[in-house]
Amino acid sequence: MVLTRAGWIGFVLALLAVCTLAPLLNLAVPADSVFHMSDYAVALVGRIMCYAICALAMDLIWGYTGILSLGHGLFFALGGYAMGMYLMRQIGRDGQYHADLPDFMVFLDWKALPWHWTFSGSFGATLFLIVAVPGIVAFVFGFFAFRSRIKGVYFSIITQALTFASMLLFFRNETGFGGNNGFTDFKRILGVPIQTHEMRMLLFVLSGATLLAFFLFGRWLVASKFGRVLQAIRDAETRVMFSGYNPVGYKLTIWTISAIMCGVAGALYVPQVGIINPSEMSPANSIEIAIWAAVGGRATLVGPIVGAFIVNGAKSWLTVAAPEIWLYFLGALFIGVTLFLPDGVMGLVKKLRRSAA
Amino acid sequence: MTPDLLEEGAKRAAAHHIGESTGKTESGGRAAGFGRPAAAAREVDVTHGRILYLEDVSVSFDGFKAINKLSLDIAPGELRCVIGPNGAGKTTMMDIITGKTRPDEGTVFFGSTINLLRYTEPEIAGMGIGRKFQKPTVFEQLTVFENLELALKTGKGVRASMFFRLDSGQSDRVAQVLHTIHLAGSVTRPAGTLSHGQKQWLEIGMLLMQDPKLLLLDEPVAGMTDEETARTAELFLELKGQHSLMVVEHDMSFIKTISEIVTVLHEGSVLAQGSLEQVQNDERVIEVYLGR
């Protein structure tokens, strides 16, 4: 069963809220009305929905399969960079230098596009790359790691090193990804200006719809026998092997799916925030994804989405209200959840419901 | 010999000669007789009267010889008990048979054609060797039913699992095993909430779901009540005949109930073999157990 009756009702309500209510409140309701959804709110929620996709992806690999990745920020950034390259090409001759090449290449005195920018002009190819690049990187890395039976904290450390190494690589100007400045100053997407209300709303709706679609897909996965094998791998991997399953294929499948989800999230995120740079690959970003999942409650799918909203909501409020305490708050939150709410917010909700009944 | 049998034999000979150049024959490229059809690959061949065959197997960990020139064989349908003091190599022997540990030397055959040393744990499990661990190992977060369902003998690939639907024959099989292991009343309970003895039963049930030809059982009655132990003995005696069983136990009264042949392991090799009475009266066995 993918969802219960109540679950389906909630799902449809969420879909309606994202696809019709939010656009109405933002575009149709006048700005001075109390019901108006501000552009700031659209930008914030749109961004958090992208984060929530990452948290969902983290839940599949960590919550259900027991493999803690501390490098999911890499896949998010790869998807973002694939989209960013396309957006850079869409600037055309409207950049600072009014040249055919993106500004940073003119600045570096490059005369032609590097080879890996070959398909960046095509939107179709970009959509393919958004899925293919994180997918292939994850598949190749996962193949060797899982085949060598690298597990637990060792796997986490290697993923952390992977994203850190990639960050250093992307920092370099020669790599051809704009160095530490990354890509920014986007103008258009598919020839349509990117800064309009309508385009922002469209990206918001797309992010929300993608999040909900991935949620359904995740529910389908974990409700299948495939999902139960994943949980079995988490709880007793040797028993799984002696039951005739080869865990490598299972881990590799869910690992790659999870990476692709992050890549798609990154691609939706970049046009909304208008910038992508190597700091997205910093180890701290990847660790934060794990925190969202832990705060919300692992192995629940809904939990990590809730966790992404709670932590990022608090972040956007606190970094304005009291910027100096944000990091302390994040640290305290992580310790608090680990000590008092091992099952996260969802675990607390469950406990409260049980004591009420 | 009738003409059609001759003709069939000639066909197998021809097929064998084609395969010889690539080494992809059932006998691994070696010369073979054509009097009877060789069993299909990964299909256990017990025509020589042995389902498991270990010869001169040795393995050492950091210089410690856990298994030392161990030779042992088991007949189809046999129930073999293996005893021995701690550190005799009982669990290591099971690790070798199931592909978890690679021996330094020696041969391990399943039937007369399958060289087990060439295969991984999941492949060996798929060929029909089931194993119960010393510490009961079940999927604690999943229900009793889901535990059994995962162990079911069916396609174990990723895609097969994604689109798996339990058919009526399979759910009958689950119901039957649930009844056998006396857990029919706990179908929806998470396995983690079961008692120690019940977990042992559930793990045995998971083995039964795999429908293995050979069961390796490491201390199956540890932590069971007397009544549960008696029921386990009953179950094993029932399984004997259709399945081959190798039981490692310390519980002598349990062994007395089920045993025909008992093998005593000591320092990684077979010390004595025979009926329980015989080995109990064996001077060397007494010495090892009493430490004289």
Image (cartoon, coloured by chain):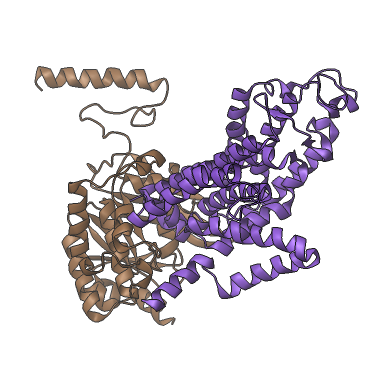
Chain colours: A purple, B brown
Q: Is residue B61 left or right of residue B288?
A: right
Q: Look at the picture and state if A303 lies above or below B212.
A: below
Q: Is residue A276 left or right of residue A70?
A: right
Kindly indicate the quadrant of the structure image that contains residue B199. bottom left
Work out whether residue B85 or residue A42 is closer to the camera in this orientation and state it.
A42
Q: Is residue A332 left or right of residue B164?
A: right
Residue at the far left: name it: B2
Q: Look at the picture and state if A292 lies above or below A218.
A: below
Q: Is residue A241 visible?
A: no
Work out whether residue A289 or residue B46 is closer to the camera in this orientation and state it.
A289
Work out whether residue B166 or residue A331 is closer to the camera in this orientation and state it.
A331
Residue A94: x percent and y percent?
A: 81, 24
Residue A28: x percent and y percent?
A: 57, 42
Q: Look at the picture and state if B4 lies above or below B61.
A: above
Residue at 67%, 46% in the rendered image: A39
Residue A104: x percent and y percent?
A: 85, 29
Residue A88: x percent and y percent?
A: 75, 28
Q: Quadrant of the C terminus of chain A?
A: bottom left
Residue at 38%, 69% in the rendered image: B192
Work out whether residue B247 or residue A224 is closer to the camera in this orientation and state it.
A224
Q: Is residue A321 visible?
A: yes
Residue at 18%, 20% in the rendered image: B8
